[in-house]
């Protein structure tokens, strides 16, 4: 009887120890999952029918309809840019749906911008009509190619462009695939934006998320900020 009771005590203690260990693991995993989310700094899908918060330079910008509401740049004879967000943003991911609708000439492009200082200084990911994607820096109106890769670029096709900026690390994605990356320390912070060069395009689903350790590009439970 004494042996049986001792065994029961040992068994009960073992179960309690295992339960506590499992709870600790679950808590750690839960905290890790929470830490993997990034804060949403900015979103705009233009469904409100306006482009409030955007500052355009060049081109002809309107909110139009292409299935859903989009931010449209319809001019094809010059540079065109539109900036949004906050100049103090440092490390973040910016993503947008970009659909080129016309290229006026050869080697034209549509682009997503990051760490914009002004309309002539920023990093950008450009989809070019010569079937390349380029990660570039524009400084005082002078451009430098940091990295490039081959990719198909077709008028009328929507692409998801994304730029991750963290410290001096720059990464450019097309449809979720990392195609370009570089290291550059010219700009440490800045706004986001969209642009075209002798091209027209529709822009939609712009989202900016802060870069935190282990963070992914999206946080579905975050409140959008304009």
Image (cartoon, rainbow, N blue to C red):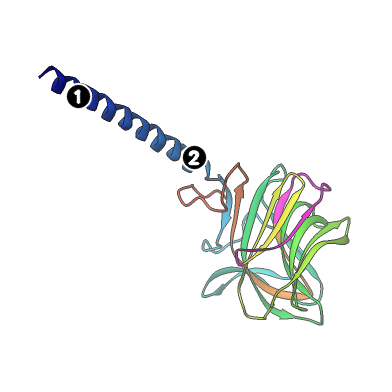
Measuring from the top left, give residue 22's x and y in whole percent. Answer: 35, 35
Q: Is residue 197 left or right of residue 178?
A: right
Along the line of sight, the residue nearer the viewer: 76 or 4: 4
Measuring from the top left, give residue 206's x and y in whole percent. Answer: 60, 59
| Element under disc 1 | helix
Does residue 176 show up magenta in the picture? yes
Q: Is residue 141 above or below residue 38?
A: below
Q: Is residue 81 left or right of residue 8?
A: right
For the magenta stretch, what is the residue range? Answer: 175-192
As measured in the structure, the alpha-carbon distance from the residue carrying label 1 to the one carrying label 2 is 37 Å
Does residue 129 show up magenta in the picture? no
Nearer mark to the viewer, of 1 and 2: 1
Residue 114 lies in what quarter of the image? bottom right
Which residue is rendered at x = 62% and y = 56% of the image?
52
Which numbered marker is on residue 32? Answer: 2
Q: Are marks 1 and 2 in contact (CB under 8 Å)?
A: no
Residue 102 lies in what quarter of the image? bottom right
Q: Is residue 128 above or below residue 161?
A: below
Which residue is rendered at x = 59% and y = 51% of the image?
42
- The 10 Å Cα crowd at callout 1, few under 14, some 14 to 19, many 20 or more, is few
Measuring from the top left, give residue 34's x and y in whole percent. Answer: 48, 41
Which residue is rendered at x = 72% and y = 66% of the image?
111
Measuring from the top left, give residue 79's x and y in whole percent. Answer: 80, 69
Residue furthest to the left in view is 1
> Does residue 75 appear anywhere in the picture?
no
| Element under disc 2 | helix
> Pointer 1: what residue?
7
Along the line of sight, the residue nearer the viewer: 101 or 123: 123
Along the line of sight, the residue nearer the viewer: 71 or 160: 160
- The 10 Å Cα crowd at callout 2, few under 14, some 14 to 19, many 20 or more, is few
């Amino acid at each position: 009887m004494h042996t049986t009771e001792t065994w029961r005590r040992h068994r009960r203690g073992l179960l309690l120890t295992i339960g506590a260990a499992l709870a600790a693991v679950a808590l750690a995993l839960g905290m890790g999952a929470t830490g993997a989310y990034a804060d949403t700094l900015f979103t705009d899908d233009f469904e409100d029918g306006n482009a409030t918060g955007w500052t355009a330079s060049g081109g002809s910008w309107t909110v139009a309809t292409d299935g859903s509401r989009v931010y449209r740049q319809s001019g094809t004879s010059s540079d065109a840019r539109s900036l949004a967000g906050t100049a103090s943003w440092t490390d973040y991911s910016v993503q947008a749906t970009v659909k080129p609708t016309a290229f006026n000439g050869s080697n034209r492009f549509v682009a997503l911008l990051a760490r914009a200082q002004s309309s002539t200084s920023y990093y950008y990911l450009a989809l070019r009509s010569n079937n390349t994607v380029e990660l570039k820096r524009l400084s005082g109106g002078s451009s430098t190619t940091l990295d490039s890769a081959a990719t198909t670029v077709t008028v009328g096709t929507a692409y998801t462009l994304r730029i991750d900026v963290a410290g001096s690390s720059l990464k450019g994605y097309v449809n979720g695939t990392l195609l370009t990356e570089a290291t550059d320390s010219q700009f440490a912070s800045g706004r986001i934006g969209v642009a075209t060069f002798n091209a027209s395009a529709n822009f939609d689903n712009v989202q900016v998320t802060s870069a935190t350790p282990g963070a992914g590009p999206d946080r579905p439970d975050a409140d959008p900020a304009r």
